[in-house]
Amino acid sequence: MKLILIHYAELALKGKNRREFVRQLAKNIKQLIGTSKIDKEHSRMLLYVEEVTPAMLEHLALIPGISNFAVTFECESNIEAMQETAKKAIEAEFPHPQGKRFSVRSRRSFKRFPMISTEINFEVGGFLKNAFDLTVDINNPEITVHVEVSEHATFIYTNKRKGAGGLPVGSSGHGIVLFSGGIDSPVAAYIMMKRGMRVTLVHLYNSSINRDFTKIENLAKQLSLYQGRVQLIMIDLEEFQRHAIALVPPRYRMIIYKRHMIRNAGIIANEMNAKALVTGDSLGQVASQTLENIHAIYDAADLPLLSPLMGYDKEEIITVARKVGTYDISIEEYCDICSYLIAKHPETKGKRAEVAEFEAELPTTGLDMIKQERIFFAGAKVERK
């Protein structure tokens, strides 16, 4: 068996609730990585796997709640065992370590160990220096050997990888994401996952222009890699849009569309007892996201409406999309319902009085909610009718 040492930062600050957060993270890792054994220690987890692959490490780096992690060697807590295990750790990661700059960084969670950290650094470092003809360099090492002394064992590793941070999915309630299939909303969904929110995706479409949902399903499948189980609900707004096109001027249709989408997402939220709605809006990015239009659109929500990308620019959003694997899917061609038969230059300063006037003529309630549901488990699609 291989051993991966996992640290969590924010979870360690949760006081009396920490045990529940740690339990949720362990549950998520088991589900997503496919292992049955995780040991929980002080501010760390030990994940046992049959084999470590690059794909597994990339996956771990994006699971919310993990601060950092490393493939680790375990040994008894005595200096001779530490020295030999540190040598083995270097040989596993660096085929030709001779002459490289290095440092040793030790940490003791077991304070009754008879040596302090600087003494461990000196003893292990001196052994490694002679074994590989290394050069000590505390400030700019090519090799960093980490030594963690716990009560029952010592863990030694050389390649610490940064994790996603945040909180484990499922520790901060349930929210509904208005899921367009563009670049932004999948990123918004992932960021809320990082804050511990379990998300359900609601995609609104027009059946007269959208019939192939492969792109939307593939995005949901990709996000299931970080949440585990992702539910996708798709709602047909063809009937409403038909009325809106007949009764609303083109420059105001986008605002009216978005307000109705929020209402529908709110209905789903109430059915599922979710506590918030989530959008991928970014202030000023497009016409619907001016401050005036945000005011006019968000007024349709009965629940808190969260917009985690509001202060991001497009390049920042794309960077996250590439990182979580949604970007290449998001840029595939797909007809966006919000751009259907709107003005070339839509309204950028929507007025609530005008919105109310247009909606007074529209059947915003009483329409049949035609919906389809799909559930994804860590990349595998399961249909539900």
Image (spheres, rainbow, N blue to C red):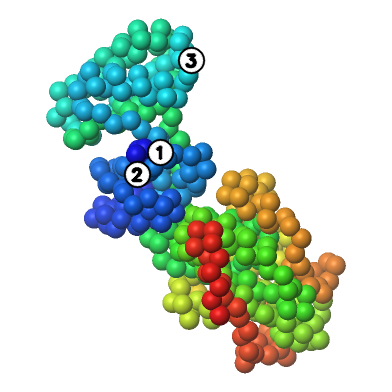
Q: Secondary structure at mark 3?
A: loop
**Can residue 248 be seen in this snapshot?**
no
In the displayed structure, does residue 277 sit left or right of residue 31?
Answer: right
**Can residue 19 be seen in this snapshot?**
yes
Q: Position of residue 375 (x, y in %)?
A: 53, 69
Q: Amino acid at mark 3?
A: His
Cβ–Cβ under 8 Å for marks 2 and 1: yes
Name the residue carrying label 1.
69
**How far is mark 2 from mark 1, CA to CA?**
10 Å
Label 1 crowd bin: few (<14), some (14–19), many (20+), radius 10 Å: many
Whether 69 is drawn above or below 94: the answer is below
Q: Amino acid at mark 2?
A: Leu
Q: Position of residue 95 (x, y in %)?
A: 48, 19
Q: Position of residue 59 (x, y in %)?
A: 50, 46
Whichever of callouts 3 and 1 sits on the residue coming sooner in the sequence is 1
Q: Which residue lies most toward the right here? A: 344
Q: Position of residue 296 (x, y in %)?
A: 65, 73
In the displayed structure, does residue 120 sit left or right of residue 373?
Answer: left
Q: Which residue appears at 48% of the width and 80% of the height? A: 270
Question: Closer to us: mark 3 or mark 1?
Answer: 3
Q: Secondary structure at mark 2?
A: strand
In the displayed structure, does residue 312 sit left or right of residue 46?
Answer: right
User: 150 and 81: which one is in front?
Assistant: 81
Q: Which residue appears at 35% of the width and 19% of the height? A: 87
Q: Check residue 47 in the rendering and tell me which mark sits there, or answer none.
A: 2
Q: Which residue appears at 40% of the width and 35% of the height? A: 70
Q: Amino acid at mark 1?
A: Phe
Name the residue carrying label 3.
96
Quarter location, residue 111: top left
